[in-house]
Structure formats: C-alpha cells, structure tokens
Amino acid sequence: MPTPALPATTQARAYFIQDGRLVAEQLEVSGEHPARSSMEALLAGPRVAGHQTQVPAGTRLLGLSVTGGTATLDLSDHVRHVQGIPAIPLLLGQVVFTLTQFPNVQRVVVRVAGEEVRVLGGEGVTVPEPLDRATVQRLLR
C-alpha cells in the first residue's frame, strides 16, 4: 500500500507578543516540514501590526530535529543578545509555543551555535531544559 502524499501546505501558527502576552499569527507553511517552516516564519518576524518579537534581528535557524517528542532547536549566536526579564521568558515562550503546536513535539531543547544553553542574557536567566508550555507559563508569571 503506498504511503499517502503529504499536503503541499498546511495551516500553522507562529507566536509573537502583543501587550506583553503571547499571540498567534496564522500561517500557511510547508506540509512536509511544518515545524521548520513555522520556526522560519517566527524568525522572520511578525506580519500583523501591533505584534512584536523578542527574537533578535538576524537570528538564523541552524538546525531542528524532533525525536521522541523533543524538538532540538539550534539558533545562531544572535539569540545571546536578548537581555532581561521579561524579554528572555517571552523569547522562550515564542519558540516553545510555536514548536509545541505540533502533536509530535511536547518539549523543546534550545541550543545556540550548537552549544547547550543553560543561561541567557547578562543577568544569567536560567533556561530550564527541556522546556514545555507549563514551564514557559511559570517563567512568564
């Protein structure tokens, strides 16, 4: 029996910020690689007026894999430039909510230029690993 073809595109979301809260923007992304396409849309920035992002300009997606419900995300060094609270928890929220919308992703491990990230920013904000939606919601309080 042949494997059913994947749709060329599918509906997804990228999460941005409005009034200090995460908000979703609807996207049409690759049906073959929806998580990767959604992350690329997140890194490209918001398309809706009034939405902002904590993703530093120039941040690139270096890698994304999903194994056993955990997405391992590798971002460029630009992410190290995020400073302070609430910027860092909001950035982590954008990433985690964008990736965990997919049924095969429950957790996210963030790497920067291939290295594990335990802290971000000059204040040394701890990055718990792996991250899930409940952990992010605690960080945002």
Image: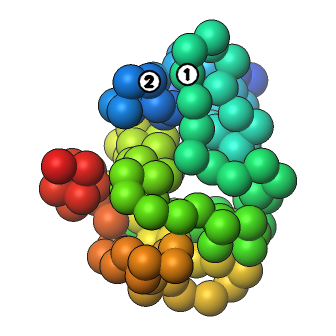
Residue for badge 1:
51
Marker disc for residue 120:
none
Q: Secondary structure at mark 1?
A: loop
Extreme top residue here? 49
Q: Residue 113, image x and y in percent?
A: 72, 80
Q: Secondary structure at mark 2?
A: strand
Q: What residue lies at 52% left-to-right and 74% top-to-bottom?
A: 121
Circles 2 and 1: CB distance less than 8 Å? yes
Viewer can see residue 121: yes
Q: Residues within 10 Å of mark 2 (few under 14, many from 20)?
A: some
Kind of residue indicated by mark 1: His
Q: Residue 122, image x and y in percent?
A: 52, 79
- Quadrant assignment for the N terminus: top right
How many numbered discs, if any? 2
Gap between marks 2 and 1, in whole Å?
5 Å
Q: What residue lies at 64% left-to-right and 72% top-to-bottom?
A: 80
Q: What residue lies at 58% left-to-right and 62% top-to-bottom?
A: 82
Q: Residues within 10 Å of mark 1 (few under 14, many from 20)?
A: some
Could you tell which of marks 2 and 1 lies nearer the N-terminus?
A: 2
Kind of residue indicated by mark 2: Gln
- 54 sits to left or right of 94: right
- 79 sits to left or right of 139: right
Residue for badge 2:
18
Nearer to us in this view, 31 or 84: 84
Nearer to us in this view, 125 or 122: 122
Q: What residue lies at 46% left-to-right and 31% top-to-bottom?
A: 17
* Rendering colour mode: rainbow
Nearer to us in this view, 137 or 73: 137
Viewer can see residue 105: no
